[in-house]
């Protein structure tokens, strides 16, 4: 597949790229463009450590991958890190029709094809979690592990007016700088797309897909997240799975954990990837605590136990 940065190989002139205003890089990761399904797709990528496993971060509803960077950057030295703006979001181009959850999962797979990646661990926040579950449904052999942070959708977020109220409460619980990152993304995404994407999320069979997972799966929630049910209900749902799920709560966190608590989350991801016991980060004394509240018996046991 010819990327947006490549030259035409058939002698024809390459398709001109729309003029973009130069901007200062927002990340220590390299900022790049490619073409997926004839759409310009923006992404960020770490230098590739030798033999490093691939980890792709998938953003939430109406947002770009920018707010995921605080966590992704902390893991970039250990994992081949990819942070795309999915088609229709952020700086990536929009398709003629809004993509739904299955469309976005297929786009994620084709993005990995474009990067030459056979399989990866996927880290999602909010809407990114249903995208991962759908990816697992269609491409189970390509998903090494799943990390679902603040999964969105379902009865708890219905109807739309309820979800809007939950988002408003969450906005007051996130760091003030989150608004500076999120507002341009929401404005670019637009009101019509918001209504259509919300409908797609509420109709998505999240629990059914979660029950299908046959790989180690980490679910991370915050105890101040108004978009999530309480920990007891989340634990009840996790216990219905085929027992590959590890459920951990971060004390003091709201919905955008990847942005607000990157130190705690990246530490937790490292423990999960290494099958280590869940403990607080010794390098961050006094910060939010981690609480393991469910570990399925089929989940890999912590080493040393």
Image (tube, helix red, strand yellow):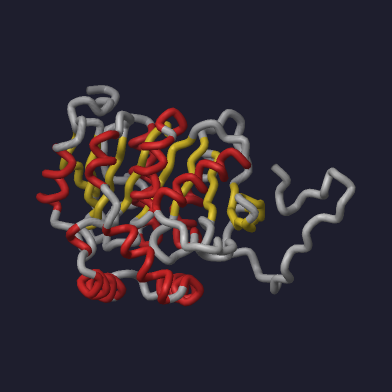
Outermost front residue: 97
167 is higher (above) or lower (below) than 297: below
The residue shown at (38%, 56%) is 258
Count the labels in the image.
Answer: 0
Instruction: Say which of 213 and 275 sits in front.
Output: 213
Residue 173 quadrant: bottom left
Going by the image, does 25 lie left or right of 54?
Answer: right
The residue shown at (18%, 58%) is 155
Q: Visible in this render: residue 177?
A: no
Going by the image, does 56 lie left or right of 210?
Answer: right
Residue 295 quadrant: top left
The residue shown at (26%, 47%) is 206
Quadrant that contains the N terminus: top right
Outermost right residue: 11
Quadrant that contains the C terminus: top left
Instruction: Say which of 96 and 109 sits in front.
Output: 96
The residue shown at (35%, 70%) is 195
Q: Position of residue 53 (x, y in %)?
A: 51, 33
Q: Position of residue 178 (x, y in %)?
A: 41, 70
Q: Position of residue 158 (x, y in %)?
A: 20, 65
Instruction: Say which of 82 and 114 sits in front.
Output: 114
Q: Position of residue 221 (x, y in %)?
A: 25, 52
Residue 300 quadrant: top left
Q: Visible in this render: residue 280?
A: yes
Outermost top residue: 304
């Amino acid at each position: 597949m010819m990327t947006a940065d490549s030259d035409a190989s058939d002698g024809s002139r390459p398709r001109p790229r729309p003029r973009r205003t130069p901007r200062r890089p927002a990340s220590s990761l390299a900022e790049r463009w490619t073409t997926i399904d004839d759409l310009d797709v923006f992404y960020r990528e770490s230098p590739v450590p030798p033999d490093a496993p691939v980890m792709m971060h998938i953003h939430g509803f109406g947002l770009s991958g920018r707010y995921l960077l605080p966590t992704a950057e902390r893991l970039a030295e250990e994992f081949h890190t990819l942070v795309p703006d999915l088609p229709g979001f952020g700086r990536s181009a929009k398709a003629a029709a809004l993509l739904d959850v299955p469309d976005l999962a297929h786009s994620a797979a084709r993005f990995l094809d474009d990067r030459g990646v056979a399989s990866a661990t996927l880290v999602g926040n909010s809407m990114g979690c249903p995208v991962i579950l759908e990816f697992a449904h269609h491409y189970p052999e390509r998903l090494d592990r799943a990390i679902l942070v603040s999964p969105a959708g379902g009865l708890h977020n219905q109807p739309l007016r309820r979800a809007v109220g939950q988002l408003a409460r969450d906005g007051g619980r996130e760091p003030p700088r989150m608004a500076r990152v999120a507002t341009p993304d929401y404005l670019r995404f637009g009101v019509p797309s918001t209504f259509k994407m919300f409908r797609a999320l509420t109709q998505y069979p999240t629990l059914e897909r979660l029950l299908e997972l046959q790989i180690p799966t980490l679910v991370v929630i915050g105890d101040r997240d108004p978009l999530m049910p309480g920990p007891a209900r989340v634990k009840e749902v996790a216990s219905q799975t085929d027992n590959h799920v590890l459920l951990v709560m971060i004390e003091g966190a709201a919905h955008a954990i990847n942005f607000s608590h990157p130190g705690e989350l990246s530490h937790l991801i490292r423990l999960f990837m290494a099958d280590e016991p869940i403990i607080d980060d010794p390098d961050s004394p006094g910060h939010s605590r981690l609480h393991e509240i469910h570990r399925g018996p089929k989940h890999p046991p912590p080493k040393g136990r």
